[in-house]
Image (cartoon, rainbow, N blue to C red):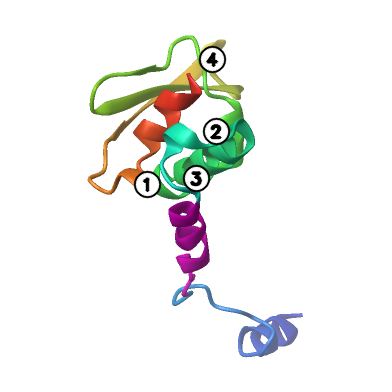
């Protein structure tokens, strides 16, 4: 069993993601074509906001589902989100993760502006 394990370590089936290069240019081009968030339909605005939160905010899909809308708010230059993780509990209470995202100078890629049009 140990010999088989060692053989698979050097096998070509193992793919390393250390130097993974992702090309996000098609997504950025799509956002440029769509224009500013103020003129987007709800479906496109939601898709754009979720993508920006996943990439710019380093969220997971489960994090986006766990955002508490009532406690999240937007100031002039910040998006403050409260993520409630229902699966995780500490001392019988839900764990809350506060997140703060500031505005970007490039307005098409700014999740704060995209979220301000959703609320």
- CB within 8 Å, label 2 to label 4: no
Residue 54 badge: 3
**Magenta residues (range):** 21-33
* Separation of marks 1 and 4 at Cα, in angstroms: 35 Å
Residue 63 badge: 2
Residue drawn at (65%, 86%) of the image = 6
Residue drawn at (39%, 47%) of the image = 56
Indicate whether 58 appears above or below 46. below
Where is residue 2? Give x, y as percent: 70, 81
Where is residue 18? Give x, y as percent: 46, 73
Most foreground residue, 69 or 113: 113
Left or right: 87 as drawn, with respect to 117: right
Which secondary structure, mark 2?
A: helix
* Separation of marks 4 and 3 at Cα, in angstroms: 23 Å
| Residue that carries the numbered disc 1 in the rendered image | 108
User: Based on the displayed image, in which of its 4 quarters is residue 43 positioned?
Assistant: top right
Residue drawn at (36%, 32%) of the image = 113
* Separation of marks 3 and 2 at Cα, in angstroms: 9 Å
- CB within 8 Å, label 3 to label 2: no
- CB within 8 Å, label 2 to label 1: no
Where is residue 89? Give x, y as percent: 56, 19
* Separation of marks 2 and 1 at Cα, in angstroms: 23 Å
- CB within 8 Å, label 4 to label 3: no
Give the mark nearer the N terminus: 3 vs 2. 3
| Residue that carries the numbered disc 4 in the rendered image | 94
Circle nearer the viewer, 2 or 4: 2
* Separation of marks 2 and 4 at Cα, in angstroms: 14 Å
Most foreground residue, 104 or 67: 104
Counting every numbered tag in the picture gives: 4
Give the mark nearer the N terminus: 2 vs 4. 2
């Amino acid at each position: 069993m140990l010999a088989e394990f060692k053989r698979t370590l050097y096998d070509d089936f193992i793919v390393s993601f250390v130097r993974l290069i992702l090309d996000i240019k098609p997504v950025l081009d799509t956002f440029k074509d769509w224009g500013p968030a103020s003129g987007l339909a709800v479906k496109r605005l939601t898709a754009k906001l979720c993508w920006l939160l996943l990439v710019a905010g380093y969220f997971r899909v489960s994090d986006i589902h766990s955002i508490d809308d009532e406690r999240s708010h937007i100031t002039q230059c910040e998006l403050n989100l409260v993520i409630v993780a229902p699966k995780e509990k500490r001392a019988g209470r839900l764990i809350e993760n506060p997140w703060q995202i500031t505005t970007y100078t490039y307005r098409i890629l700014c999740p704060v502006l995209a979220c301000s049009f959703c609320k």
